[in-house]
Amino acid sequence: MEMKNYKKRIIDAKIEEYLKLFGAVCIEGPKYSGKTWSGRYHAKSESLLYINTGGVSNEAALAQIDPKIILEGEKPKLIDEWQAAPNLWDEVRYDVDRTGLKGQYILTGSSTPQRSGILHSGAGRFGKIYLRTMSLFESGDSSGDVSLKDICTGKKISKATGDVSLHKLASLVIRGGWPGNLDYDSVAAQKSVKEYINLIISDDLYRLDGINKDKHKVKLLLKSLARNESTTVTNATLKKDIKEIDNEDIDIDTVAKYLDALDRLFLLDNDEPFSTNIRSSVRVKQAEKRHFADPSIACALLNLTEEKLINDLNTFGFMFEAMVERDLKIYADSFDAKCYHYQDYLNREIDSVIELEDGNWCAFEVKLGVKEIENAAKNLVNIKKSIEKENGKAPSILCVICGMSNAAYQRPDGVYVVPITALKN
């Protein structure tokens, strides 16, 4: 399909690869992250099951009555928001089995439907791809002078990258990586994200499973998650936080149910704990690190402006960390690496861990200011040495991702220092 204004995504290469490997490709991710446009870019025909007002289209109703009609058209065929007619999953699988052809369908989905009505997992027929909001490199806010893959494979890096202001970093965090908001300033972008959140609460959560949820309590939980962005707080701590800050109580089971619903809408993008490849004698904590799908969501929930962030560098640091770790996940995915976080019972922490396909792993600290680089680098070196002493598998690469650094280089102790505004995949 003709897409003159399509802004290419890093994930495009994986979509092309999967269309050659599988009969159908399913692109999942949060609403408005660009799934439809990416699907259209690779498709030759389409069926849109949702319309702009949020309701289902005539095609969605037709998909329930005579799904074979929806499958007609030039291939690859895009079926946008397929979860509006879950029976299409099995129909696509049947057709893929019948023809034996690759690259027949592209399905997009902004929620995970209930498994009832879906008879088969699609294993071997479907390739699943997760599309996040845009990284700084994709949005044009990173020069791309330094490759994450080059860092992870130990290549030499030395590059002057230019100065970046705190105001610029604050605006990028607040604006977020939503493709439709790239031309907005931080004020307009935040209004857009607030409306996005309101639509999730008022409409999408109910449509997910047909169960009414207490909208006020959902909002309280979202605000608590925003206050705890980039931390490893438990569900019990979220409950306590709501009680202490908002002076309201919420049942712990309700917290769990609402978190599950938000996760099924791809509004959350938590980091799993890393431990499998270290084999150290020290026990590793198993808590996930909390993240929204985009840092702009937390900023909107807390009404954070550029000035508020600059005057509260502690909060700014957590939001900046969320933006960096979003980008690291996007970049790492392009070369089939996985992102985690590390925290053990000796109180050692690593902000982000990237595990490579060969089993080696890389340790990253995320710091907003230049003055924090020295301590971050020492922390990484000390952790590496202590893991080696415990006969564990130490990280092969150490790196500090910084906001305010004006150069990318490798220190005498081997630690890389890279500005986030110079990074790409």
Image (tube, rainbow, N blue to C red):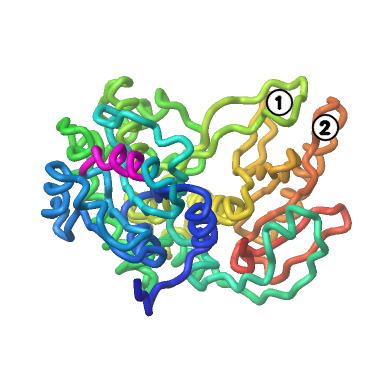
In the rendered image, residue 44 lying in the magenta stretch gets the answer no
Give the main secondary structure, helix, strand or loop, of the magenta stretch. Answer: helix
Rendered position, 226 above or below 132: above
Seen from the viewer's position, the closer of residues 47 and 151 is 47
Q: Nearer the viewer, residue 63 or 137?
A: 63
Residue under label 1, please give it.
346
Residue 94 visible in the current orientation: yes
Q: Nearer the viewer, mark 1 or mark 2?
A: 2
Which secondary structure, mark 2?
helix
**Mark 1 or 2 closer to N-term?**
1
Q: What is the CA distance from the residue labelled 1 to the residue labelled 2?
A: 11 Å
Q: Residue at the spot x=67%, y=29% of the render?
A: 275
User: What are the residue bounds of the magenta stretch?
Assistant: 85-95
Give amino acid for label 1: Leu
Residue drawn at 66 percent across, 56 percent down:
401
Q: Position of residue 8 (x, y in %)?
A: 47, 69
Residue 268 coordinates in the image, percent (x, y): 40, 42
The answer to which image quadrant residue 402 occupies is bottom right
Residues marked 1 and 2 touching at CB (< 8 Å): yes
